[in-house]
Image (cartoon, coloured by chain):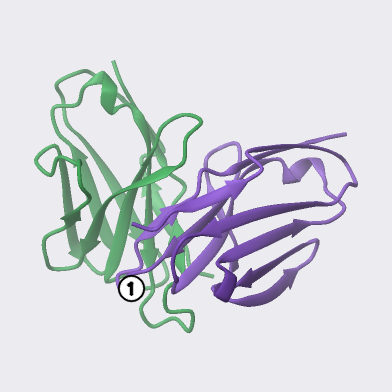
Chain colours: A green, B purple
């Protein structure tokens, strides 16, 4: 089955620094990837849609200058949290679609990255 | 945007019991998936089910698209079934998910 990986799984950083999170589709090419954020005891909220070779599309209320997304290849999307603050501490999860799959809209999720900003 | 409501919010089951989780959505969808989020946060695909009925072991799901709801059945529950169950739907061509709030399931031995 389709596998999506994320790296790192956990990261702790100091306030004001930047952190990069990688999302990779391991056995398929993903023209579209998605980034979600999940706060404790809450549901997943879509942050942005990442398309290979073009600019990401951000959901309303998500600061594009703070959450930089780069989808440089068909198997890799990165999310960089710039000038991180404690309120950015959260669980970040990516997902990917395989456009060649029989189930066209099915999405596969990575294991998530837990970010703690001190 | 589309509204996705899941019920019940919490469910406590004794091992071996059966249960039904519900997901209501407010508009037509082109995808509906059920997920189980384990204690480590990993979302596990359970079903891709924009319509119809599917079964996988002790789990089954039914989506009645015309009436805008989906049901997830857990039979003979086990402690490993504990976790949060999410329903998520998409309505656009990109496939952007709108998640429900989830159902927290605790299965006690």
- Which residue shows up at 87% across the image and 52% down it? B76
| A49 relative to B94, above or below | above
Q: Is residue A50 visible?
A: yes
Instruction: Name the spot of residue A93 as percent of width and height, x first.
Output: 39, 46
Residue at mark 1: A29
Host chain of mark 1: A
Q: Of B64 and A24, which appears nearest the observer?
A: B64
| A15 relative to B100, above or below | above
Q: Quadrant of residue A115?
A: top left
Q: Of B14 and A70, which appears nearest the observer?
A: B14
- Which residue shows up at 31% across the image and 74% down it? B93
Q: Is residue B49 visible?
A: no
Query: Crowding near pointer 1: few (<14 within 10 Å), some, many (20+)?
Result: some
| A26 relative to A100, above or below | above
Quarter that holds the N terminus of chain A? bottom right
Q: Residue furthest top?
A: A118
Quarter that holds the C terminus of chain A? top left
Q: Residue furthest right?
A: B16
Instruction: Name the spot of residue B105 as percent of width and height, x first.
Output: 70, 40
Q: Disc 1 on helix, strand or loop? A: loop
Instruction: Name the spot of residue B65 as percent of width and height, x first.
Output: 56, 74
Q: Quadrant of residue B2?
A: bottom left
Q: Of B40 and B70, which appears nearest the observer?
A: B70
- Which residue shows up at 48% across the image and 53% down it? B4
Instruction: Name the spot of residue B72 as percent of width and height, x first.
Output: 69, 59
């Amino acid at each position: 089955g389709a596998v999506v990986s994320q790296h790192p799984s956990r990261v702790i950083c100091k306030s004001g620094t930047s952190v990069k999170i990688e999302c990779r589709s391991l056995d398929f090419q993903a023209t579209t990837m998605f980034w979600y954020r999940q706060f404790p005891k809450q549901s997943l909220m879509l942050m942005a849609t990442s398309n290979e070779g073009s600019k990401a599309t951000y959901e309303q209320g998500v600061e594009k200058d703070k959450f930089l997304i780069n989808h440089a290849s068909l198997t890799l999307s990165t999310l960089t949290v710039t000038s991180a603050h404690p309120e950015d501490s959260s669980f970040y999860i990516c997902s990917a679609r395989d456009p060649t799959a029989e189930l066209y809209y099915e999405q596969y999720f990575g294991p998530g990255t837990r970010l703690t900003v001190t | 945007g589309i509204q996705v409501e899941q019920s019940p919010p919490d469910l406590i089951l004794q091992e071996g019991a059966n249960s039904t989780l519900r997901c209501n959505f407010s508009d037509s969808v082109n995808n509906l998936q059920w997920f189980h989020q384990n204690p480590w946060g990993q979302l596990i695909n359970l079903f891709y089910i924009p319509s119809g009925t599917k079964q996988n072991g002790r789990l089954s799901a039914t989506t009645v698209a015309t009436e805008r709801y989906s049901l997830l059945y857990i039979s003979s529950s086990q402690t490993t079934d504990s976790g949060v169950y999410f329903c998520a739907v998409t309505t656009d061509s990109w496939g952007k998910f709108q998640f429900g709030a989830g159902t927290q399931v605790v299965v006690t031995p």
